[in-house]
Amino acid sequence: MQTVELTTWRNGLLQEMLLTIPAAENWNDAGLRVEALLESAKVNASLAGAQLTIDLGLRSMAPGDLEWLIDRIRTQFGLLTVAVVSTDEKTRDIAKRLALNTYQMLPGGSRADSDPGTKNNALYLPQTVRSGQRIVHEGHLIIGGDVNSGGEVVAAGDIIVAGALRGLAHAGSGGDQSARIIAGVMRPNQLRIAGEIARSPEGAAPNAPRKPEVARIVNGTIHVTAV
């Protein structure tokens, strides 16, 4: 039988924490296992402040239980929950109300000690990325809404933003210089492709007409052109 696990997984170039809570046990027993596991992990001071994704799989969570879990993880164990993975739609809705990123399956399906895989596992999110939110994926990433100023999107492959890109976008996070960033309105705080960085030009008109553009590396620097 699967049990509660605390492991690491690879978000592009980032190595973050992954808490897996299988659905086999009732919540009271699973909650006790989580407490015991995190208590034992407290001896590792390097975990303090780390970002955490909670993988609930098939488990359906009550609003109060999920909120308690996230608050407990933050206040007692110093881990910042940034995302919830669940196949249960109601659980994902609860997580969204708590301002967390949500996924039906672990993005990229990769843990830190496994094969990074390919960029063919595109992730589509039909939403706006708000300020303070950070989306990371090991393949191509498609955002159906805007990326607001203060929001971040990071992908090992291409990034496509259907709306306005006003935050930070980092394509080719694993070093792929052929990666591209495409946006319906290109007004980013910062663009990154592989190891190259660019910002919006000074004096760019904030309310310019919608004009899809693509950013790519040309001769070692990021160039933005019309699609």
Image: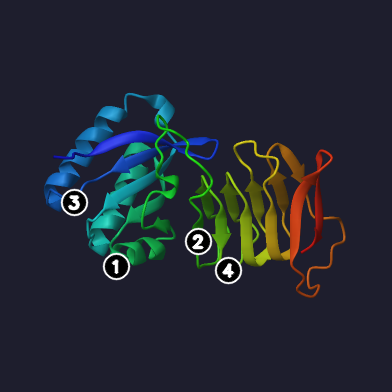
Taking the spot 55% from the left edge, 66% from the top edge, the residue there is 128
Q: Are marks 2 and 4 in contact (CB under 8 Å)?
A: no
Tell whether label 4 touches label 3 (CB within 8 Å).
Answer: no
Mark seen at residue 90: 1
Of the 4 image quadrants, the one containing the N terminus is top left
174 vs 23, nearest the viewer: 174
Q: Which of marks 3 and 4 is nearer the N terminus?
A: 3
Choose mark 2 or mark 4, whichever is in front. Answer: 2
Answer yes or no: do the residues labelled 4 and 1 have beta carbons within 8 Å?
no
- Residue 124 numbered tag: 2
Say what amino acid the circle numbered 2 marks. Tyr
The image shows residue 122, relative to residue 185, as above or below, that is: above
Report the mark closest to the observer, 1 or 2: 2
Q: Earlier in the sequence, mark 1 or mark 2?
A: 1
Tell me the kind of residue under disc 1: Lys
Q: How crowded is mark 4: few (under 14 residues within 10 Å), some or many (20 or more)?
A: some
Label 1 and label 3: CA atoms lie apart by: 15 Å
The reply to whether dot 1 and dot 2 touch (C-beta < 8 Å) is no
Residue 62 position within the rendered picture, expressed as x and y whole percent measured from the top left: 23, 62
Answer whether residue 130 is visible to the viewer in this image.
no
Left or right of 4 on screen, residue 190: right
Q: Earlier in the sequence, mark 2 or mark 4?
A: 2
Label 1 crowding class (10 Å Cα cut-off): few <14, some 14-19, many 20+?
some
Q: In this view, does 139 lie above or below 43?
A: below
Residue identified by numbered label 3? 23
Mark 3, secondary structure of its residue: loop
For image coordinates 75% across by 73% down, the residue present is: 210
Is residue 89 or residue 51 the one in the foreground? 89
Q: Is residue 94 left or right of residue 201?
A: left
Amino acid at dot 4: Gly
Mark 4 highlights which residue? Answer: 145
